[in-house]
Amino acid sequence: MEKTSKGHILESYELDVDLARVKINIEKEESGCFYNLSIPKIDTGTAALLDEIRKELVSVTSIAIGEIVDQKSIAKVKQQFMKDAGKMLKEKVPDIEKDTEDFLVYCRAYRRLRDGQLRSS
């Protein structure tokens, strides 16, 4: 059993969650068992590029009031945002691989969900 600073790793595995690979460790500590999730990090320069794309998207996108209250419309708007963000990323980084593009767009969207800046449908 592999040791951590607070206990032992009982089990370790990886999952593909949407377009990100997440490492999961089940750790046993004195106070109980815990799931430790490791998500790939985006470096500062890439995060700045994604923020620039987000600002461009916000400035060119209009949303009708009806789209805000209808759950199907919200999902459609989010999907369009992700598609447009992918296009903008591809324009700024033409040689980007599709897997990397998808990962960055989805990670950014999930960060917004985590931070409460988008609502999940």
Image (cartoon, rainbow, N blue to C red):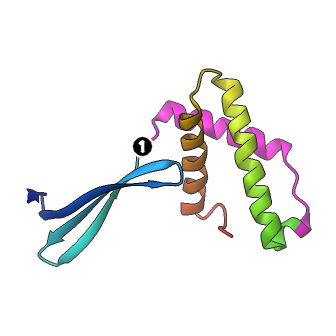
| Image quadrant where residue 110 sits | bottom right
Instruction: Determine which residue is flagged by label 1.
Output: 41
Task: Describe the element under mark 1 as helix, strand or loop.
Answer: loop
Asked if the stretch drawn in magenta spans residue 52, the answer is: yes
Asked if the stretch drawn in magenta spans residue 98, the answer is: no
User: Where 4 sits versus 121, above or below?
Assistant: above
Please state which amino acid type lies under the numbered disc 1.
Answer: Lys
| Magenta residues, dominant SS class | helix
Lateral position of residue 64 relative to residue 51, left or right: right
Coordinates of residue 17 in the picture (x, y in percent): 48, 56
Lateral position of residue 99 relative to residue 41, left or right: right
Coordinates of residue 33 in the picture (x, y in percent): 21, 74
Write the residue at 51% across / 30% down: 45
Write the residue at 60% across / 33% down: 49
- Quadrant where the C terminus sits is bottom right
The range drawn in magenta is 41-66
Using the image as rendered, state which of residue 12 and residue 87 is in the foreground: 12
